[in-house]
Amino acid sequence: MSTSIAKRPLIGVNACSQWLPGKHPFFIVGEKYVQSVAQGAGGMPMVIPALGDDLPIGQIVELLDGLLLTGSPSNIEPHHYQGGPSAADSEHDPKRDATTLPLIRAAIDAGVPVLGICRGFQEMNVALGGSLHQKVHDLEEYLDHREDKQASIDQQYNALAHSIEIVKGGLLASIWPESGQVQVNSLHGQGVDQLAPGLSIEAKAEDGLIEAFSVDNAKTFALAVQWHPEWQWHPEKDQVGDFPFYRAIFKAFGDACRARQISRTN
Ligand SMILES: N[C@@H](CCC(=O)NCCCC(=O)O)C(=O)O
């Protein structure tokens, strides 16, 4: 997308807080999320640090034309959704929880377009009052939605791990009218248990697990997906590794961010 930086909508990308071994704590964000905002949505990415209560959320939301909620290997602490104790091997990021959950509520209230991905999908459900299965793979009614840890990163994200059924007449169906069933990648151990009030299912996996939802009374675009549409922004259209479905999601998100930019600056 060739729009100059100056004309691009400002899109927040939430960071994780991680202690790099032998170093100091860092705020980090996956490059593919920043790339997908810049290339896929045509936005100006702005990384939002996990400062918790020290983050001026109201001030930031006023500046944003969009908010992308990233994935992360860490899991939301279960006390945010009255969940049971975490498994001993569960990685957490309380600074990210303390930042992103209130940020989601403020952004939706303010009419900022929001796209949640994987952990970001789960955060949107929890922030709005829903709950999670902590180990989907331990539940007999569901498939194992985790990635193959023996596979390469390319193989994990290029993999079309399972199909999703897109709900007719919804936001995702309007973004992708081409077909009601699509194959997606899958790299998650947790998943939606109770969907928050005021959310509508947009897609389910073949085992019935909710894979996408939208916010019913959102003032603008508010979509969350469990898979990873931010993958592969390098290949050109129709080249190997090109995912038109993923690209369509970011185009729709970017269009909503541009609309907010116009309304915010006029
Ligand atoms: N920890 C949660 C969410 C999983 C997730 O976001 N995976 C992607 C991590 C790496 C990346 O950002 O692509 C769960 O396990 O369900």
Image: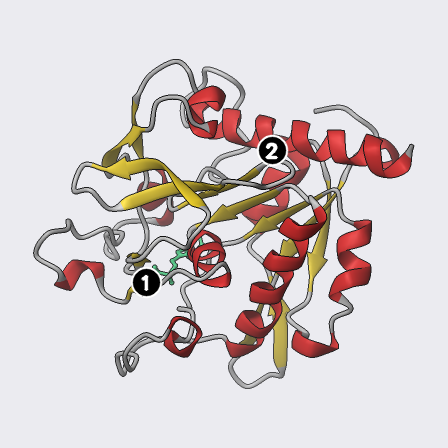
Rounded to the nearest angstrom, the CA distance separating label 1 from label 2 is: 25 Å
Q: Which numbered dot is residue 253?
A: 2
Measured as percent of width and height from the top left, residue 123 is found at: 47, 59
Front-most of residues 154 and 77: 77
Front-most of residues 141 and 110: 110
- Write the residue at 67% across / 31% down: 256
Q: Nearer the viewer, mark 1 or mark 2?
A: 1
Front-most of residues 71 and 177: 177
The quadrant of the rendering that contains the C terminus is top right
| Count of labels in the image | 2
Horizontal relation, residue 105 to residue 224: left or right: right
Asked if residue 159 shows in the view, the reply is no
Picture layout, residue 152 above or below residue 131: above
Name the amino acid type tagged 1: Leu
The quadrant of the rendering that contains the N terminus is top right
Horizontal relation, residue 158 to residue 61: left or right: left
Query: Mark 2 vs ligand 1: CB under 8 Å?
Result: no
| Location of mark 1 (residue) | 132
Measured as percent of width and height from the top left, residue 162 is found at: 23, 37
Name the amino acid type tagged 2: Phe
- Write the residue at 37% across / 49% down: 153
